[in-house]
Image: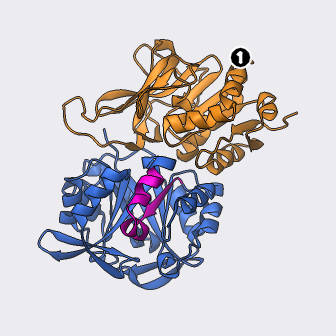
Amino acid sequence: MNKFDVTVIDYGAGNLLSVKRGFEHCGAKVNVTDDKNLIMSASRVVLPGVGAFSNAMDGLRNSGLDETVHEVVKEGIPLLGICLGMQMLLDESEEFGLSKGLGIIPGRVISIPSLDIDNNNQKIPHIGWNSLIQPDGRKSWDGTLLSDIKPGDSVYFVHSFMSNTVVPEHRIANCLYGGLDIPAVIGKGRTVGCQFHPEKSGEIGLKILRQFLLL
Amino acid sequence: MRNIRLIARLDIKGPNLIKGIHLEGLRVIGSPNEYALRYYSQGIDELIYMDSVASLYGRNSLGEIVKKAAQNIFVPMTVGGGIRSVEDVAEMLRCGADKVAVNTAAVKNPKLISDIAQKFGSQCMVLSVEAKNIGPDHWEVYIDNGRERTNIDVVTWVKKAVALGVGEILLTSIDQEGTRKGFDISLVQSVTNEVSVPVIASGGMGYKEDLINVVAEGHADAVAMADIFHYERETVQSVRNAAKLNGIEVRDV
């Protein structure tokens, strides 16, 4: 049995302490594990990730955790992918050649264009605080990971690639970078993904983590 | 469109927050955690911790300080000073750091940059550059916290380092550091003109106007501030408001 509120999948990716502390700050009991049984009996699962797409996917596959993530989704356990963890939810990524993702949310991970919409060079990676906005056609964030968030609230991004989802309904929030819409929050069923780091986005980020505990 | 990041820089010696002039003559300010929490509650965008004597003594005392900070601080933290290997980076990330800033070890072994970038991603690999002006539009790279010269040209070095996988540059002017006389704007300009990655201007923030100038003229993407906050000459909010009033985009807190 898994007596924790949040289970963070540990496949050797970056700073997991902050994700753990963020949820703990929201009152959750958190464990960090690569144990498949613990993950499958979790109330909520977080797929973190920093670094390169193919390395992280290899990390998951080599330990068979890719299958576990699929099981989690099939069982309807709420799953939150953060940053690269969100990008891995898609079908494939163009980072360092084409590599296959988990294929949970249809779409492809592509690089952020190095030119903005006025054809000026722009900084890559996209690092810093940026505002969450509602994509065209979405009128509210009620019932989503962002139900406690106002359009315009800022969160912390750091990434060079973006998750181009295919189905408009899967796009919950964007941010604008170089005049271009960048997917910031995506979701399908009980699976959600944040391109930004909620655990590094101050009080706004903590609100988002708290909301994940209620999904 | 592009929010300028306001960063508090905490120079550390042993267990203490310190501040020097030209990276020397260090004075003890207080407990790093206390100051970090204050800046977090004022709405700082990021924190940078720099161990000022780590590369001199070949050790890093920052792990414990960062671990403590990560308990209650939920903004990005960069840690530098004495990072020598991929293992050192892994250890800092385990302590709750998001990025590492590397100077001395990267100058001595540039391959370390690509090793870190490949293992943890470019976003994790901040190049720390300590620059000293040596003539009109010429700056030399210094290592060991501003103590040792290298004969390497700053602009040449940053271009090489970015090609190796640096995701961000922390650019400290040794000449301006601790003087409260404003940033070395031509230094910042020379680097922002040449690289596509974000540049953090550091060294010289005396007044709010200095931030405005280094962003408007130097095109800095982020500004590191130390004694202006440590000595409570300004708060994060007052700097943020001044930036906004002068047309510099910053996040709304």
Which quadrant of the figure contains the C terminus of chain A? Answer: top right
Closer-to-camera residue (B123/B25): B123
Tell me the orange chain: A
Name the residue that disc number 1 marks. A74
Residue under the point 53% across and 57% down = B40
**What is the three-letter code of the residue carrying label 1?**
Lys
Q: Where is residue A2 in the image (x, y as percent from the top left)?
A: 84, 35
Outermost residue toward the left in this view = B136
Residue B19 seen anywhere in this rendered image of the structure: yes
Region of the chain picked out in magenta, as a range: B98-117
Q: In this view, does B40 lie above or below A72?
A: below
Residue under the point 19% across and 53% down = B193
Q: Position of residue A207 (x, y in %)?
A: 60, 38
Q: In which quarter of the image is residue A198?
A: top right
Q: Is residue A10 magenta?
A: no
Residue under the point 65% across and 46% down = A22
Callout 1: helix, strand or loop?
Answer: helix
Tag 1 subunit: A
Figure colour of chain B = blue
Closer-to-camera residue (B17/A76): A76
